[in-house]
Amino acid sequence: MFRDINVPSLDFLRGAMPILVLLGHAAIWTGGVKELRPIFMGGGLAVDVFIFVSGFLMLWHYLSRENKEPWDRSSTWSVFWVRRFFRIAPLYWVVLTVMYLSLEVLLRWKTEFHALYPPPWAGRLIGEAHVDESLSAANIASHYSFLFGFIPRFASNNPLPDWSIGLEVQFYLAFPFLALAMRKLGWLIVGAGLLLVWFVAIRQIHVGLLTAPGSWGWFPMPTFLPLRIGIFLSGMLAANGLFSPKPSVAVASFIGSVAIVALHNKYLVVPIGAFVVWEWLIRGDRLATWMKRPAGLCFAFLKSKIIKFAADCSYGVYLWHMLVQLVLMRILVDWGVFAGRGFLWRFAVLSLLCLPVVYLIAWASYCWVELPGIQLGKAVIKRRKKLVEIGG
């Protein structure tokens, strides 16, 4: 039915997930975590969906470009890394700079808001003493170089949800080797090896401020690639299944993909399972006749301007929303808007004010930072190819 190499349903996931993260953090700031637990949990679930999407997209693009960019050539790897760097770094560095310039104030506000509206874990944070929030040269350098995900004390130590950025970069560094290994050794061997690494890591390395270190150490958030490699693998399996012309390979890949996310979090099966089933049905003329019209309407919605807008803004919304929430909290608390109000009022007001502001900033960031960064990356790749041709 729909055989486009593009995957519009991923744009829907990319656009929706930052909203869940934003709402989850709004529940924290306004003291509604217990009462709004599904929303709070949805924010954590959304990050796992992002990880799945990343694994899917990297392999999807790899398979679609393989004829033009064979992965047994080192030049292909360098092109891949340049693309990813210029996609991730420019906006992250801008947001990071803004955060560091106001870090002292932001940390003071964070402490005050948690005192006003204590989260359920207040006073129970075992690992908080191991987090280094100082403006040291090592801390700053680790973030601008994307190395902070390897270093527990820096892995999640500022008012940005950037821990997943460090994780993402680690996956980008490893992906060419994983893709080549899968091509040479096969999915079964590589997949089994990655699952083994994942299972061992999550049992030996403890994660979270409420936990003590495990036998192999501790991270405040799962910023170390082995702690989430299974979810990346799930996305890669889904991409392999959709790309494969063999039904047996597709079904086996889909079952593996959904089984992995079910092992990690049973609630993650809902968005991932829905995505896999939808794409499987619409890409192989497998829909019953009566389903084709509603499926066509859904497909048109997924390709609509509002979904593209949400997807284009997704990275900016994810990076900016915490800073926007802190500023709005400062204003709302100082103006007495929250005085005598319950958690639901506070949550609703903060969320409704934050959404338009953060989307305006995110759209401006997309137009003025992200797109120029992508174009610069393309120019670097083009220039490099010309130099290689001249040298050859």
Image (cartoon, rainbow, N blue to C red):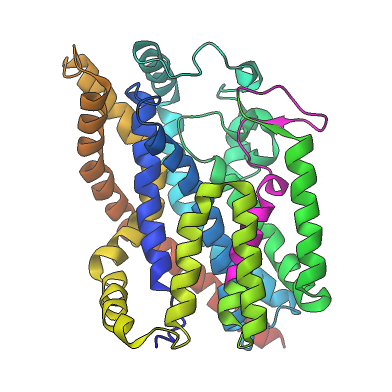
Q: How many marks?
A: 0
Question: What is the x, y in percent for residue 205?
Answer: 75, 35
Quadrant hosting residue 227: top right
- Residue 83, compared with residue 162, is above or below; it is below
- Picture residue at 76% right of the left edge, 57% below the top: 194
Q: Position of residue 165 (x, y in %)?
A: 55, 47
Residue 172 visible in this rendered orientation of the protein: no
Q: Quadrant of residue 10?
A: bottom left
The answer to whether one can see residue 55 in this image is: yes
Lateral position of residue 99 relative to residue 209, left or right: left
Q: What residue appears at the point 56 percent right and 66 percent down from the top-left corner?
A: 56
Q: Is residue 117 magenta?
A: no
Q: Residue at x 37, y 13 (%)?
A: 112
Residue at 31% across / 66% down in the picture? 308
Lateral position of residue 202 relative to residue 34, left or right: right
Q: Which residues are magenta?
A: 210-238
Q: Nearer the viewer, residue 370 or 62?
A: 62
Question: Magenta segment: does it hold 214?
Answer: yes
Q: Quadrant of the C terminus?
A: bottom right
Up/down of 60 relative to 197, above or below? below
Residue 219 screen position, x and y as percent? 67, 32
Q: Nearer the viewer, residue 269 or 356?
A: 269
Residue 351 rendering spot, x and y as whole percentages? 26, 36
Quarter of the image for the N terminus: give it.
bottom left
